[in-house]
Image (cartoon, rainbow, N blue to C red):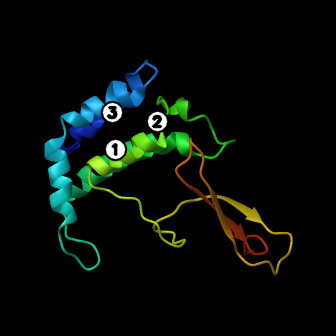
Amino acid sequence: MHSDQQPYRSLKEAMQEYEGADLYAGVVRPWMRGQDAERRWMEDFSKRQGSPVPRATIEEIWRLYAFSRIVEMLQLDFAPEGRPNPNQWGTFSIGAAQYAEFMDFFGLHKVDAPFCPFFHEIVTVETANDRTAPITQSSRATSRTVRCTRARARGGWPRR
């Protein structure tokens, strides 16, 4: 593990070891208070120019990867109902407002865009009974869900 990943590793371990009722107030928010340097680094990184992606060292890529793992852990509770219990990974839920606060702290903002695989995750695929039915998408948001996108496949999966 590279030293730039250590803050995220520490947060991951603290999240998994936490036994209280409010993960965000008990672990995440206090951790964020000590991450001004990380926040400034992300802000500086976001200002880099690239075509289409700015140049980054391998260490910076590792650092961004470590951050992405924390983001994924915080998103676990937003999975649609019927999915595996997110607590099986050793985390507790946080609310959508807390998730947004975490992302805003690091200068990341919600992207409201038409469906694009780059910005959305296909959570479930439902095969239409009518092979000529158009591909559609739906999303739902509840107090426990930021956004879940579904896609309907035209006529099922291609056969080989």
Q: Which amino acid does label 1 sit on?
A: Phe
Badge 2 or badge 1: first in the primary sequence: 2
- For label 1, count other residues whose C-alpha is less than 10 Å away and answer few (under 14), some (14-19) or many (20+): some
The residue singled out by tag 2 in the image is: 94
Please give the name of the residue rendered at 32% of the width and 56% of the height, measured from the top-left corner. 108
Residue 149 appears in which quarter of the rendering?
bottom right
Amino acid type for the residue under numbered disc 2: Ile
Q: What element carries label 1?
A: helix
Q: Are marks 2 and 1 in contact (CB under 8 Å)?
A: yes
Q: Nearer the viewer, residue 156 or 106?
A: 106
Q: Name the residue under label 3.
A: 28
Task: Say which amino acid is labelled 3.
Answer: Val
Q: Can residue 59 be seen in the rendering of this structure?
A: no
Q: Which quadrant would the C terminus be assigned to in this image?
A: bottom right
- Pick the front one: 59 or 12: 12
Identify the residue position indicated by label 1 in the image.
Answer: 102
Q: Distance between the residues labelled 2 and 1?
A: 10 Å
User: In which quadrant will I find the N terminus?
Assistant: top left
Marks 1 and 3 in Cβ contact (< 8 Å): yes
User: Disc 2, disc 3: CB below 8 Å?
Assistant: yes
How crowded pointer 3 is (Cα within 10 Å; few <14, some 14-19, many 20+) is rated as some
